[in-house]
Image: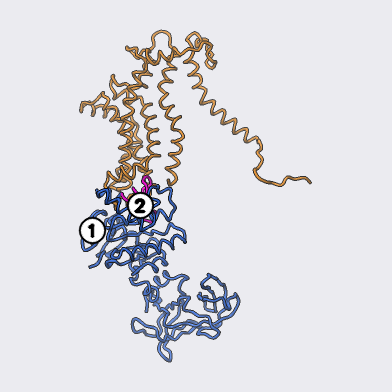
Chain colours: A blue, B orange
Amino acid sequence: MSAVSVRDVTVAFEAFRVFDGLSLDINEGEFIVLLGPSGCGKSTLLNAVAGLLDVSSGQIWIGGKNVTWEEPKDRGIAMVFQSYALYPRMSVRENMSFGLRMAKTPKPEIEKRVNQAAETLQITHLLDRRPDQLSGGQRQRVAIGRALVRDASVFLFDEPLSNLDAKLRNELRVEIKRLHARLGKTTMVYVTHDQIEAMTLADRIVVLKEQKVQQIGSPDEIYRCPSNLFVAGFVGSPQMNFIKGRLKGGDNGLEFVSGKRRLPLVGYQFSQKQRADGEVVLGIRPEHLTVADVGTWSDFKIDVVEPMGADTIVWCSDAEGSLQVRTNGCKGSAPGQHLALGIDTTQVSLFAANTGERL
Amino acid sequence: MNTIEPQGCRPRRLTVGRVGVYAFLLTAALFILLPLWIMIMTSLKPMDEIRLGNIVALPTALTFEAWSKAWSSACTGLECNGISVGFWNSVRILIPSVALSIIVGAINGYALSFWRVKGANVMFGVLLLGAFIPYQVFLYPLVRIFSMTGIYNSLLCIILVHVIFGLPTMTLLFRNYYLGLPIELFKAARIDGGGFWSIFFRVILPMSTPMLVVATILQVTGIWNDFIFGLTFAGRQNLPMTVQLNNIVHSTQGERAYNVDMAATMLAALVPLVVYFVSGRWFVRGIAAGAVKG
């Protein structure tokens, strides 16, 4: 039984169809991240699951119950918003207890649950403050606390960290992950456009683009075997290098050829048998290129060096165009220097040039 | 060469342009204030002094007789109880009308902005259309409707009229204010299990203070200054102050008592004046708070 199941759902605003027959199954206790650029429909999907948006057709099941026509409050969900959405005229305690008070929960029970949630999130000392007396990070903690108090089986997060600065974002990200582990069987659906959040938090990532699911898989799968050019380009920073070329039959199997650059594809797992002479795009992540004195490809010249502390991004180019290389040292990294690149063939991705699909 | 190194505050210089600006502002202020000055001075003079024609001059024999006469014994037609009757009538019309029109407008705006009722835009359009049609067009049909339902010429009738005609503006005001509030607040409240009324009274209304202040000022001044509705719908027993003032000014026998007229006018204008003085600060703040995300 899955915790959340979206079955053939269509959402339409007047004539414009946001989703057309989208289906998605989320397991109990799973941390699912909906990842995509803005406008891809991820928030719309979340709102439809929450019941804040009517679906035109299809069903939404939560916890083995068809909740398509249920009110948001009856779906057993809690939601955290990007803008925190704290009630400005209520204290933190009142904010957190609002849902329970609406549900006419007995007072001692409310007290207990609010205190428990506050302790979990370390906001006990803030309980009597008003939202405008809190910092951004504290506000989002309160918003999470308000969701926690509801004792829901499914948590929905709508870009909860996007309004925070980088440091707080990292802190809260870890906190959310910890929370998920502690709550055990709680399902979390998390919407973000930040691929780092997606990679670090998710059990499974759903990559969306233009209202269509591009790929569903573990962060590792998404990163190592992106199913198409869009996923390959969207996930990973710095971006994957893309090189246009063709497939040619070589001495031992197929070979990728782009001008002077050649790469024998020994050890590459094709999804189906390929014929030679197709237009393809080769994708190589910057960390799968190595700087060497003698490498697979030579005659590169360094354009720009970006030291990032832990590692260094080297932009280098040959006659065909430029590539990004992630190195961990600073050795030999001065603009103008010449170098050769080594390539790990097992780690590259190949896509059909016309469809963008993985080969 | 001895030049001063620029440092700190830039020195202020009186330029021709600046003098011109001040001159213009001063003239404009005088232009507005002069009639008020003349009214106050006239109301504080006995008739002998007024006849001399020095309308701007200070009174030589200061007297408040005109004020007390205007308040309690000036004749408004056949009765001679002053304008105080009208004052209390106006208060009785004002308080329920203002409260009702604001609350109904706020609920309207809330329903139109957050709940996105089907056909909300059409309804809003129709409501706005109402705001652009001159009131006079409605007078006769409304009189007919009210007299058929039997509430014509009553306090209820005039209150209803004020609520109805206040609706378009009040709805517009609150709808636009609510559209500026983050929709997530409403979504969060729905997930927390709030219904139509509980979200309105517990979440939305407490956030509406700036608009409530603005709406109150608009409605108090508007309803207090109303003449034609009061005259048409209130009935003889409930004529508001503005109508009574008109009666005082126009029903003089013999010599025209300018000082009493002026005093009565000042008394009638007092309430909006006080509202502006007390809440002017709030008024501006309310508009600003509505414009910038609060």
* Residue occupying the point 39% across, 77% down: A352
User: Does the stretch in magenta take in B247?
Assistant: no
Residue linked to disc 1: A68
Q: Quadrant of residue B235?
A: top left
Q: Are marks 2 and 1 on the same chain?
A: no
**Residue B199 seen anywhere in this rendered image of the structure:** yes
| SS assignment at label 1 | loop
Does the magenta stretch mainly form a helix, a strand or a loop?
loop
Up-down relation of residue A4 to residue B147 (above or below): below
**Residue A355 seen anywhere in this rendered image of the structure:** no
- Left or right: A102 as drawn, with respect to A218: left
User: Does the stretch in magenta take in A89?
Assistant: yes
The boundaries of the magenta stretch are A81-97
* Crowd around label 2: few <14 · some 14–19 · many ≥20 (10 Å): some
Which dot marks residue B184? 2
Residue A21 image position (x, y, % from top left):
27, 65
User: Between B117 and B83, which is closer to the camera in this rendering?
Assistant: B83
Up-down relation of residue A238 to residue B199 (above or below): below
Q: Residue furthest right?
A: B1
Which amino acid type corresponds to the residue marked 1 in the rendered image? Thr
Up-down relation of residue A83 to residue B148 (above or below): below
- Left or right: A228 as drawn, with respect to B144: right
* Crowd around label 1: few <14 · some 14–19 · many ≥20 (10 Å): many
Up-down relation of residue A201 to residue A337 (above or below): above
Residue A272 image position (x, y, % from top left):
33, 82
Q: Chain of mark 2?
A: B
Residue A182 image position (x, y, % from top left):
33, 64
Number of callouts: 2
Which amino acid type corresponds to the residue marked 2 in the rendered image? Glu
Q: Chain of mark 1?
A: A
